[in-house]
Amino acid sequence: MRQAWRVADVRAAEQTLMATLPEGTLMRRAAAGLARRCALLLGDTGGVYGARVLLLVGSGDNGGDTLYAGAALAARGAQVRALLLTPDRVHLAGLAALRRSGGFTTTDLPARADLVLDGIVGIGAAGGLRPAAAALVSRLGELRGRTGQRPPVVAVDVPSGVAVDTGDVPGEAVTADVTVTFGCLKPAHVAGPAAPRCGQVELVDIGLGPVLVTDPAVRVAEAADVAAWWPRPGAASDKYTRGVVGLATGSARYPGAALLSTAGALAGPAGMVRYAGSAHREVVRAHPSVVAAPRVGDAGRVQAWACGSGLGTDHAARTELRSVLATPLPVLLDADAITLLVGGEHAEDLRRDAPLVLTPHDGEFKRLAGEAPGADRMGAAARLAAWTNAVVLLKGDRTIVASPGGEIWANPTGTAALATAGSGDVLAGLLGSLLAAGVPAVRAAVAAAYVHGLAGRHAALAGPVTAPDIAAAVRPVLAALLG
Ligand SMILES: NC(=O)C1=CN([C@@H]2O[C@H](COP(=O)(O)OP(=O)(O)OC[C@H]3O[C@@H](n4cnc5c(N)ncnc54)[C@H](O)[C@@H]3O)[C@@H](O)[C@H]2O)[C@@H](O)CC1
């Protein structure tokens, strides 16, 4: 698991650590790690000696890190130029170090550079980039390196222009190939549109770990976590002990949603799938192992329900939703079931002890919460989770999972390939299967999003992706993940 902390927590930890160390120690550690990574990058394209390195230097300590790292590269023979955004406000000791090592300052963007370091602004950023910085960033694409290609950009701590605590990108921002960050990850490295702008994120240890005592703002599951959480059948397992998942999905109008949620559920860890709904004949024809009935009340025993994908919003759909919510079982509500919650008619039904998971996309989120997720998707998901007492899985490029208790996860495996009709139905079935297999709701949501994303990527290797391709890709992805 990887974890990221908010700026206020990082600052507090840094203060604690700095009080025990000679002044400038942390910046020296940060700059040394940064220079090492830059030297490695230059090694890939002809070496440090003689390389043209451009430093974009803002007024704060982020600029200071950049100047010290530039000094280290200049000392190894690189031609280092620092473009100072605010020449009257600059880290003076860093600038002196650069000059001592033979580095120069410049006032405009040069035509050529083999490496760019973005030290315009780090965790001290307030709001979007100021006009002069934004104008500079918009021109970075003009640069060419010794191979004639665009030079790699290394962001110092975070790409300038991103909102560090939310991962939002409010305007012009740097797109980095590598981000070298210090002490710990920050939310922008893992969540929101900022995350893909970071490129490869590398963490430099500056000794912050022992004093970083607050809970992380956001967690990111890794393959080993998902593999550890994923239930596997044992010698004593049978179809019932592995869990039976019930699906209340699809309708005469949307029979495809029934088929896709079933395909997702069949790829999950539960031992049996029961389908309840008007597409019961189609489901059994396509998936003979499924036991199907026309209504939730006739479905037989299950250990969790997934409800809503393609269910419709008519009276019959409302009755099925009510039946599902009346059970003492974990329930996942997707798509139309979320829409049916709007207006509060099911407020009483939602008072339940068993886990509830909601899987809205932005439109469903807006309908239910009354406003769009906005720039702070993690905060928005956490608020909806607290309000509904449900685990909320907010779909997106970096899908967010938020628990009612305030735990937040960002999914790292998202891909544009998942943005296709019926993709969410597959996810609902898969997540329902994990719930039925006894996986706690937050882990089930995190694991389902992770595997669903990998399945989208796997399917995309063969060309344009449809939802059945995603469902089919879950098995090979699990085979590789679970070993
Ligand atoms: N505090 C510490 O102990 C450490 C800090 N380090 C570095 O210090 C950075 C934080 O330094 P600072 O607190 O000085 O803050 P920054 O250097 O991130 O930014 C603050 C400066 O940028 C300007 N600024 C703010 N918002 C801007 C915007 N939207 N557009 C353009 N300019 C803007 C401000 O005028 C201010 O002078 C970290 O990101 C990291 O790089 C590292 O050296 C590691 C240790």
Image (cartoon, rainbow, N blue to C red):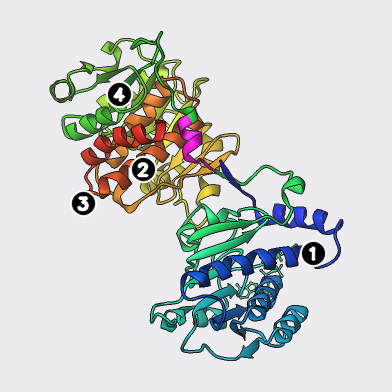
Q: Earlier in the sequence, mark 1 or mark 4?
A: 1
Asked whether the beta carbons under mark 2 and mark 4 sit within 8 Å of each other, the answer is no
Label 1 sits on a secondary structure element that is helix
User: Which residue lies under the disc numbered 3?
Assistant: 463
Asked whether the beta carbons under mark 1 and mark 2 sit within 8 Å of each other, the answer is no
Marks 2 and 3 sit apart, C-alpha to C-alpha, by: 15 Å
| Dot 4 amino acid type | Leu
User: Which residue lies under the disc numbered 4?
Assistant: 247
| Segment tinted magenta in the rendering | 220-227
Marks 2 and 4 sit apart, C-alpha to C-alpha, by: 23 Å
Q: Nearer the viewer, mark 1 or mark 3?
A: 1
Split into quadrants, the picture shows ligand 1 in the one at bottom right
Marks 1 and 4 sit apart, C-alpha to C-alpha, by: 58 Å
Q: Position of residue 147 (x, y in %)?
A: 40, 80
**Residue at the spot x=66%, y=86% of the render?**
103
Furthest residue toward bottom: 107
